Amino acid sequence: MILSVTDLAVLRGGVALLGGLSFTLGPGEALILRGPNGVGKTTLLRTLAGLQPALAGRIDGPAEGAAYSSHADGVKPTLNVAENLRFWAEIHGQRDIAPALEAFDLVNLAGREAQSLSAGQKRRLGLARLLVTGRRLWLLDEPTVSLDSASVALFAAAIEAHLAQGGAAVIATHIGLGLAHARDLDLAVYRPDPGAAGTVSGAGDPFLEGIA
Amino acid sequence: MRALLLRDLRLAIRAGGGFGLSLAFFLIVTTLVPFGVGPEGGTLARIAPGILWLGALLSCLLSLDRIFALDREDGSLDLLATSPAPMEGVVAIKAAAHWLTTGLPLTFVAPALGLLLNLAPSGYGWLMLSLAIGTPALSLIGAFGAALTVGLKRGGLLLSLLVLPLYVPTLIYGAELARRGAEGLPVLTPLLMLAGITLGTAALLPFAAAAAIRVNLR
C-alpha cells in the first residue's frame, strides 16, 4: 500500500470542501480525481502533499513524502532547462537528469533559458521534475494544461512507466489519459452536507490551534 | 542544500537578479549625504559610521522581498516544502545567499565610501568588522520578515515596516562599534553585543521563519 486515506475531510479558507473521503492506492495504481471546478481537487492534493492540514481523518502516505506538481512549475526563467532540472534532482539527492530530459523530449532544449520556452515546453520541464524526485507517489494537479496531444502522449507514457515500476499517482485532470490501471474518483459525492458543515470557525487557523 | 545556495547565488548574479542593485543604492545614498549635510570634514567624520550603517541597512532592505516572493510566485516554495530539504535549512540557506550577495559586498566597498565621508583611516578596519559581523543579522531578520509577508500581494511596504524596527539593535551596536573603533575608544562591549545579536538571530529566526512559511503556504 502506498497511500491510504481514511475518512478525510479537507478545508479551504475555513470552509469544509470534502468530507468522509476514504480510498487506498497500491503500487501500479493511479487515481483520477473528477469533479466540477471548486469541488476541492487542488485542496485535496495539497492536503495529501502535506502543504495544508486536514480537517479530520488520516492520511498514511510513503515515509519519504510525495512528489507534488501544481499549476506553477517552479521553473526559474533565468536558468536553462538542464540547470532547472539539475537543481531539483540535487535537492532530492538524485544525480542523473538525462532520463528525465529524454522522457519529455527536452534533450534539444537542455541549453535553452527557461524564459524563452513556450508554455507547453515549460510545462514539460515542470513534469520532467517528477522523474528526478525519485518518489513513488505522484500528486498531479491538472498536469496536461497547455500540453499538445503529442506531449500528452509523452506524459501518459511517463505515468505508465512510473506505475510499471511500482509507483502510484493521484491525478486531477479533465481529459482522458488512456491509463490502463486508473480508477476514477468523483469528488462531487463527498461534498459535505451544506446544512451540517458550512463554515468551520477557527479550524485551520494556526493561532487557534491547541486551544479547543 | 548546497544546490539551493548555488541556485540562489546564480539567480542573483544573472540578469534581473538584483545583485549590484543594492550595492549601487548603498553607493548613491552615502554619496548623497555630503550634499545634504555639507562638505565640512569634522561633521562628516563624526556621522560617517552612522551614515554608512544606515546606508547598508537600507540597501539590505531593498532586496529582502525577493528572498521568498519569487519562489512563491513560480511555485518553487511549494515544491521545496514537499522536498526532503527541511524548511528551516531552506530559510537559513536563503538568508546566507542574501548575505553573500548584499552584506558581504557592502562590507568590502564600505571603506571606499568611508573615504568619501572623511572617516578616520584608523576606523576602516572597525567599520568592515562591524559590517561583517552585523550584516548577517540584517539578512536573517529580513528573511524572517519576508517569510511573514510571503503570502501577501505587494507585501514589500509591510515588510519594511515589520523589519526596520527589528533592525534597531543591530544598527545601534554596529554603528557604535564602527564609531568607537574610529575614535580609538574601547570596542569590546558593542562588539560582543553585535556578535550576540547575529548569533541569536541565526539560532532562532530560521525556525520562526520556517513556521511562518508553513502557515503562509496553507
Image (spheres, helix red, strand yellow):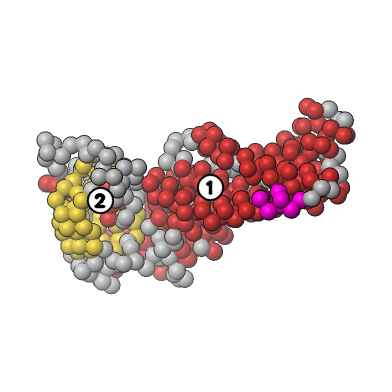
Q: Which chain carries label 1?
A: B
Task: Let me know if residue A154 appears in the view.
Answer: no
Work out whether B43 lies above or below B6.
Answer: above
Label 2 with label 1: CB-CB less than 8 Å: no
**x and y percentages locating residue B43 in the rendered image:** 84, 32
Mark 2 belongs to chain:
A
- Tell me which corner region of the image, top left, top right, bottom left or bottom right, holds residue B63: top right
Residue A38 within the magenta-colored segment of the rendering:
no
| Residue at the disc numbered 2 | A54
Q: As shown in the figure, which amino acid type bears the numbered disc 2?
A: Ala
Q: In this view, does A65 lie to the left or right of B171?
A: left
Q: What stretch is highlighted in magenta?
A: B187-193
- SS for callout 1: helix
Please state which amino acid type lies under the numbered disc 1: Ala
Residue positioned 86% across, 30% down in the render: B39
Number of numbered discs present?
A: 2
Q: For residue A172, which numbered disc appears in the image? A: none
Q: Quadrant of residue B48?
A: top right
Judging depth in this view, the residue of A202 and A189 nearest the camera is A202
Residue carrying label 1? B143
